[in-house]
Amino acid sequence: MNYSYNGQTVFQDAGNKLSLSNACSYCRQITKHHAKTFYMATRFLPKRQQNPIFAMYALLRTVDDLVDLAEDKLSNGQLTRQEINRSIDEWKTRLHDCYAGNHGNDPILMAWQDTIRQYTIPIELPLDLIDGVAMDIDFTTFETFDELYVYCYKVASVVGLMTAEIFGYSDKKALQHAIDLGIAMQLTNILRDIGEDVDRGRIYLPLEDLRRFNYSQEEFMKKTMNENFISLMKFQIERARRYYQSAEQGIAMLEKNSRMAVEISSRNYSEILKAIEENDYDVFSKRAYRSLYQKLSTLPAIWLKSMITG
């Protein structure tokens, strides 16, 4: 049996019997392909924590891809909403089976099953994530930040809560800071992707914030750059940075060997906000990103900080 990803065979199993080693390799390849910054940060984790993190990412990525594909097929009339609901429910059933001890010879679920044997990760967390990404199928613009917060929690903060269990922590307060890091990173995603989302007919920023800065939905959809939009962006960036600042307090509560990986992810993601500023807040025609050199240049300071605070 061949196990392929992105058109490439990750491994072959002539005996049609999946091994845990091959399952973990499969999850690693998915992570490496889709999340280069995350993958780089994960390499600083102890070996015993790397495979569980790869399994978690592969699980979440698969669910995300499932919803993206369903969304495309729905818009093209290839699937009905009922068929999509059945597909999502089937994945939830498979997840319940996995927690009950049956991975169904699926490499991702086998790796995830091994993870939940080692760490206490409630099934409610991945189920929340499935519900969160499914919100994109019948997308409705958020009226308030409270509504956006729920979305960010489900698609990002639950990931922080799962990783916290794998990383280990000395204080339960670390979990709230993990939630805050998820909120910060998802807000960063939203700000970075504004132009792409407009092309899809979507506004993820709360409408109450647009009204606050006298910037209309029509201007947003026309990608209008003006002083009101810049003020709106400055407000959103400051909000995201407050969540990053809260998240920073939780890093010291993690097990020492896990801190550098989280710090790298947080620092490099927060730097996207700086890139937006450097682009004069033009998120309509420019995509904010950090180069590999810029990402690597943060490592010495992060390493030194980990030595001082560790």
Image (tube, rainbow, N blue to C red):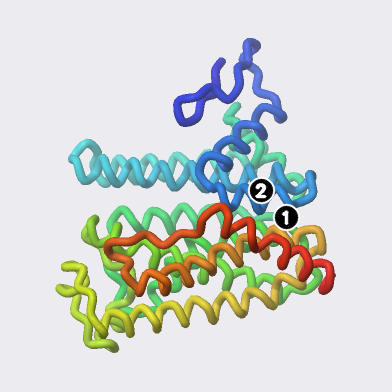
In front here: 308 or 28?
Answer: 308
136 left or right, relative to 10 = left
Give the residue at x 21% y 60%.
201
Instruction: Tell me the residue that label 1 is attached to.
Output: 166
Image x and y of residue 195, in percent: 29, 62
Image x and y of residue 110, in percent: 64, 34
* Label 1 packing within 10 angstroms: few (<14), some (14-19), many (20+): many
Give the residue at x 82% y 63%.
256
* Label 2 packing within 10 angstroms: few (<14), some (14-19), many (20+): many
Task: Place residue 58 in its image quadrant.
Answer: top right
**148 in relation to 162, above or below:** below
Task: Give the numbered dot on residue 191.
Answer: none
**163 in relation to 107, above or below:** below
212 left or right, relative to 181 = left
Instruction: Tell me the residue that label 2 is attached to.
Output: 53
Q: Are marks 2 and 1 in contact (CB under 8 Å)?
A: yes
Q: Amino acid at mark 2?
A: Ile
The local secondary structure at tag 2 comes to helix
